[in-house]
Amino acid sequence: MAIDVLQVSQLLTDEYSVKILVATVRVPRSAQDIAMKFGIPIAACYRRIKDLEDAGLLVCQERRLSQQGKRVSLYLSMLKNAYVFFEDGHLRVKFQLKTGGADRFGNDWHEVRLEPESRSDSGEGEDFDNEASDEGEK
C-alpha cells in the first residue's frame, strides 16, 4: 500500500489530530475521554481517530466493557517522532513510530511532490511546472 505522506503531514498539522496524539502518547484513552478533556466534538474525534488509525499513527490498544455494558476502545499513539521541513522549495518529511523496527514509513526522508493547480486562462504556474518536472528527473 502506498503511503500518502502529504495526507499524514496534514494530519500532524490538524488541531484535533494533534490533541488526540498528545493525549494518547503515554496512556491509552477512549474517544469519549479525549473528546471531553480536550474539547473536541465527539463526531470529529471519531473521524480523526479513524484517520490516524488508517495512517498507522494510532492503534486500538485495548477494548473494555463500560459500566453500562458497552465496548469502549482505548487508543494509543504510535508516533515517536515527526519531522517536517520545507527547504529549497521542497517539502520533506520523516516519521518514526514507537515500534522501533521497520515500519510503513521506513527510515528515509520522503519528498512531498506538490502539483500546482492548472490555470488554462493564464500563463501563471508554467514555470513552476517546468521546475518541478526538471527537479524530478535529476
Image: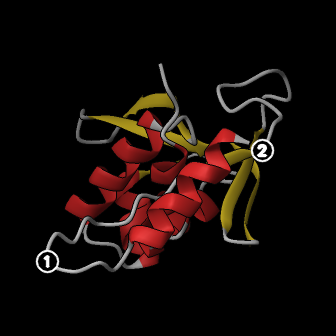
| Quadrant housing residue 28 | top right
**Which of marks 2 and 1 precedes in the sequence?**
2
Residue at 50% from the left image edge and 52% from the top image edge: 6
Secondary structure type for disc 2: loop
**Depicted 68 relative to depicted 117: above or below:** above
Q: Which residue is mark 2?
A: 109
Q: Which residue is mark 1?
A: 121
Q: Is residue 111 left or right of residue 80?
A: left
Q: Is residue 87 left or right of residue 100?
A: left
Q: Is residue 20 visible?
A: no
Mark 1: amino acid: Asp
Q: Is residue 95 left or right of residue 130?
A: right
Mark 1 vs mark 2: give the one in front. 1
Mark 2: amino acid: Trp
State if disc 2 and disc 1 touch (CB < 8 Å): no
Q: Is residue 4 visible?
A: yes
Gap between marks 1 and 2 measured at Cα: 36 Å
For the residue pair 73 and 81, the one nearer the viewer reads as 81
Where residue 128 appears, as percent x and y from the top left, is 49, 69
Where residue 79 appears, as percent x and y from the top left, is 69, 47
Where residue 44 appears, as percent x and y from the top left, is 26, 63
Residue at 63% from the left image edge and 44% from the top image edge: 136
For the residue pair 1 and 17, the one nearer the viewer reads as 1
Residue at 67% from the left image edge and 63% from the top image edge: 90
